[in-house]
Every structure is written in C-alpha cells, then in structure tokens.
Amino acid sequence: MTVCSVLRMGEPLLLAVADEVTAFDTLELHALIQDMEDTMAALDGAGLAAPQIGVSLRVVIFGKEEDRSENLRYPDANSVPYTVLINPKLTFLGHEQEDGLEGCLSVPGLRGIVPRHTHLHYSGFDQYGKWVERTVSDFHARVVQHECDHLDGILYPMRMTDLTTFGYADDIFPDQPLP
C-alpha cells in the first residue's frame, strides 16, 4: 500500500493542464491508479486526480467499492460507483445548476459552497482502455466535475461565486459532520 502526499493549493502543478494518457494497460498506469486508490482510501476522499499526487496525466478516480466503509467526509452523499476515468469528456445536460458544499484533499480543512451542473454525461476510458460512459446527476455529477477540474488546473475555490461561504469547516459550517 502506497499512500502518496497530496499537493496543496499553491503548488504550480495543480494549476496546469494535465497531459492525455496515450498508453493503456501498462505497469506504470496500473501503479499510478493503485497509488491513487490507496491515497484516496487513506484520506477518506470522494475522488482523486493524478495531478493531486504530482502526476500530470488526465486520470481521475472517484466513488467507492461496495465493500469500502462509509466515507466520513461526505456521510450524507448518495452512493457513487467506484470509477477509473481517463481522458474524460464531460457534456452538461441542460443549464440547471445547484449550490453544494465541497472540500478537497488539496485544500485541507476548508470548505465552500460551489455551483455545479446537476446533470451531465461523461465518457472516457478505464485503465485497460475500455470505454466508460454514464449519464449522472446530483452528487455523482458534482464529484465528476470537481475531479475533472483538477485536470484543467482548476481548484474548487476558483468556481465559487460567494467567498463568504468559504472557510474552515469547523468554523463556517459547525453543524456539518465533516472532519
């Protein structure tokens, strides 16, 4: 098990556009995904992007496997199936957006209210080069948008429209059960 250090806001790599993956089903790609899985599980993340652990590739993982314990950071969230998504493409379905509370392993201890599209279609590949696509909504759509933003050098505070809702979780949202 390899738990990697997560880059924090201010690191230049987090502001860069990640490179496309060109080779699938390689030892290097499998090792990267295993490191991402181990890191996300150890930190109770809802998702993780490769740039967050210092690898500038268009790879995200999100959700949880059925046998994983409940996510402590998002206890009230709907279930999101565990997904490896490489070179993702997002298509927003309609213009409807919803404000929601977000945090990020790269912005530790802070939370904020972020507007996100409520419905979208995503597609890409898994680590074996198999095509993946889903149409999703609500928390699932939020997680996908958040993680894919990392691939374009965007952190959630850059999406916020009201910075009065941005702060340390235990100060600004004391009633939220988020560590």
Image: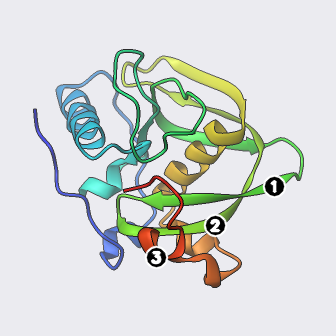
Q: Residue at x 36, y 49 (%)?
A: 57
Q: CA distance from mark 3 to mark 1?
A: 26 Å
| 66, 38: nearer the viewer | 66
Q: Which mark is residue 113?
A: 2
When asked about the image quadrant of residue 67, the answer is: top left
Element marked by disc 1 = strand
Decide: is 179 above or below 68: below
Q: Residue at x 45, y 25 (%)?
A: 82
Q: Are marks 3 and 2 in contact (CB under 8 Å)?
A: no
Residue at 33% over, 76% down: 12
Q: Position of residue 128 (x, y in %)?
A: 37, 18
Query: At 67% from the left edge and 25% from the top edge, which residue is drawn?
Result: 134
Disc 1 vs disc 2: Cβ atoms closer than 8 Å? Answer: no
Dot 3 falls on a residue whose secondary structure is helix
Amino acid residing under circle 2: Ile
Identify the residue at the far bottom of this view: 164
Few, some or many C-alpha atoms within 10 Å of disc 2 (few <14, some 14-19, many ≥20)?
A: many
Q: What numbered label is drawn on residue 171?
A: 3
- Location of the C terminus (image quadrant): bottom left
Q: Amino acid at mark 1?
A: Gln
Using the numbered discs, state the Cα–Cα distance from disc 1 to disc 2 in whole angstroms. 12 Å
Q: Which residue is mark 1?
A: 97
